[in-house]
Amino acid sequence: MSTPRPSLSAEEAEAFAREWIAAWNSGDLERILSHYDDDFEMRSPLIAERGFSSDGCLRGKAAVRPYWAVGLAARPPLHFELIGVHVGVNAIAICYRSVGRARLVVERIQFGEDAKAICAEALYRADPDGA
């Protein structure tokens, strides 16, 4: 895994989040993956729920690709609306709504020196309605 980079500015974080949302909304898996380091780590309860890894963690683009491909193929199609971006130490949190799935999500993304994501974690509301 790459070394963490210095914190992003508010402007850099906002630009990354807008492009990240646009990539997901495009449905282009390669565009989505371009934001990530080759050996990044992805954590999500949906990884375990959907049977991709019992611990909810996938490591590397090769492992994440089929998981995200399933998500992109789902109906209704994925569509995200950006709610906000929060800046932390070497990381940002993107808050967004998954339209059509009645789900609010926070995605925490840590960056390496090359401004690629080295670790990401999707966090979902605990209530069953997700609203």
Image (tube, rainbow, N blue to C red):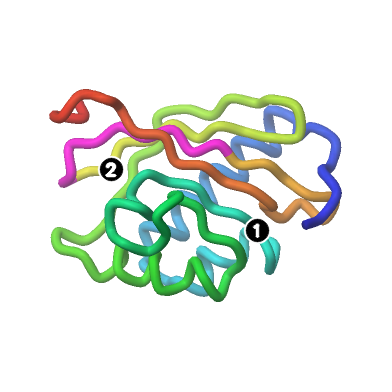
Residue 91: image quadrant is top right
113 magenta-colored: no
Q: Position of residue 84 (x, y in %)?
A: 47, 27
Measure how far apart labels 2 and 1 are at the Cα level.
Answer: 23 Å
Residue at image location 60% in from the left, 41% down from the top = 109
Q: Position of residue 55 (x, y in %)?
A: 45, 50
Residue 116 placement, left or right of 92? right
How many numbered tags mark residues here?
2
Query: 63 or 12, which lies in front?
Result: 63
Residue 34: image quadrant is bottom right
Residue 10: image quadrant is top right
Query: Is residue 4 depicted above or below 24 in this figure?
Result: above
Specify the amino acid type for callout 1: Phe
Q: Tag on residue 98?
A: 2
Q: Tag on residue 8?
A: none
* Residue that badge 1 annotates: 40
Specify the amino acid type for callout 2: Ser
Residue at image location 62% in from the left, 33% down from the top = 92
Q: Position of residue 66 (x, y in %)?
A: 40, 73
Q: Residue furthest front?
A: 54
Residue 115 placement, left or right of 105? right
Query: Is residue 76 depicted above or below 17 in this figure?
Result: below
Disc 1, SS: strand
> For the N terminus, which image quadrant?
bottom right
Residue at image location 68% in from the left, 33% down from the top = 11
Magenta-colored segment: predominant secondary structure: strand
> For the C terminus, which image quadrant?
top left
Q: Which residues are magenta?
A: 100-108
Please tell me how crowded label 1 is: few (under 14), some (14-19), or many (20+) other residues with Cα within 10 Å.
many
Residue at image location 53% in from the left, 69% down from the top = 31
